[in-house]
Amino acid sequence: MNGPEARGGTTVRDALRGWGGVTAMAVVCALVALVALCLPLTTATTATQNTTATQTARTKAAEECEAPEKQTLSPSSADGDTIRAIKNRTGEKRKLIVGVDQNSYRWGYRNPNSGKTAELEGFDIDLVHRIAKDILGDPDAVQFKAIPTDQRIPAIEDGRVDMVVRTMTINCDRIDDVAFSAPYFKTGQQVLAPKSSPVKGYDDTLADRRICTAAGSTAFAALKADQKDGKLPASTDISTTVPNQLDCLVRLQLGEVDAVVTDGALAASQAAQDPTVQLKGDAFTAEYYGVAMKKDADDLVRRVNQILVDYRKDTANGWQASYEKWLSATLGKDAKKSEPPAPQYLRTP
């Protein structure tokens, strides 16, 4: 039949039915494609939302800062972009790059008796080796970079180091610039002066005295704030600052200053180096050391926090053993005084 309803043996109704099938198939394909496109979009959106939530929580925490040592991320052993980038380094460059001190006795210092290389040793150095072992499987896969006190944050922000482990106090100003791990040590600001000095502590005996602090340190910030508030005599000269904390001890030995204000843990080690000086009075602040990293290195922060949890549990080769080896001689046998409280982590929505 050659009428309008039949061409090549196919009716118009059949043709329409065929096009309907194609249309239906096209619709199905479009839906499948849309779902396929939406899946990664949904995953990416979720990741973005999580990152935004973390950033929002951090911003709010910084603005309402009261306990900066509690403003860190929960532990995790997962590898993220930061850790993968470290692991993807090849050859001799496959190392964790860490900013440390090389002049703080028993914390991070070069022992001239350790051999020709005068390797870095101390409490902070032990922690670095533990972090390297966990992330790269080798405790010696570390490139140490000695950095001054006032260069700790710039070194992190500029990407010169992956982290800083250098008796670095967690405080409200610093959490605006870097991310910290949970605390790994408790200390406080204290006065160091010659044994023969009339200085008795952080009090009126510092009137008309010259004090040395490290530039960019919490000690200098505390002195500046207390002098402004009248808690420190106005006649106390706090203008002497140095790049490295040990330089203050040298200034004290040369008679260029009358006292040093620094973390009690560091001051005790300096007193061990020079028996003519001693700690004067009690600590006048409570502070905590943390590992500092880049603000957006969330996976590295979480990983370090997990390492710290395991490090403190390891009684044979962890925090306690390192304290006994390096610090008990200067800070006393009771490590509990220096051990930070159980960590508290930042909650995100």
Image (cartoon, grey):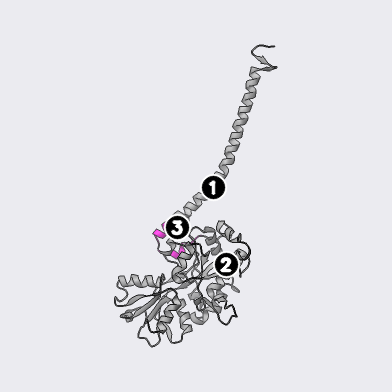
Residue 312 visible in the shown view: no
| x and y, in percent, of residue 95 in the image | 59, 65
Mark 1 or mark 2, earlier in chain: 1
Magenta-tinted stretch: 59-73
**Magenta stretch containing residue 66, yes or no?**
yes
Please name the residue that numbered disc 1 is placed on.
44
- SS at circle 2: helix
- Residue 100 is labelled as none
Quadrant assignment, res 61: bottom left
> What residue sits 52% from the left and 48% below the top?
46
Using the numbered discs, state the Cα–Cα distance from disc 1 to disc 2 in whole angstroms: 30 Å
* Badge 2 amino acid: Ile
Q: Is residue 13 left or right of residue 225?
A: right
Quadrant assignment, res 4: top right
Foreground pick, 53 / 145: 145
Structural crowding at the residue carrying mark 2, measured as other residues with C-alpha within 10 Å and reported as few (<14), some (14–19) or many (≥20): many
Nearest to the eye among marks 1 and 3: give it: 1
* Badge 1 amino acid: Ala
In this picture, is 255 found above or below 166?
below
Please name the residue that numbered disc 2 is placed on.
131
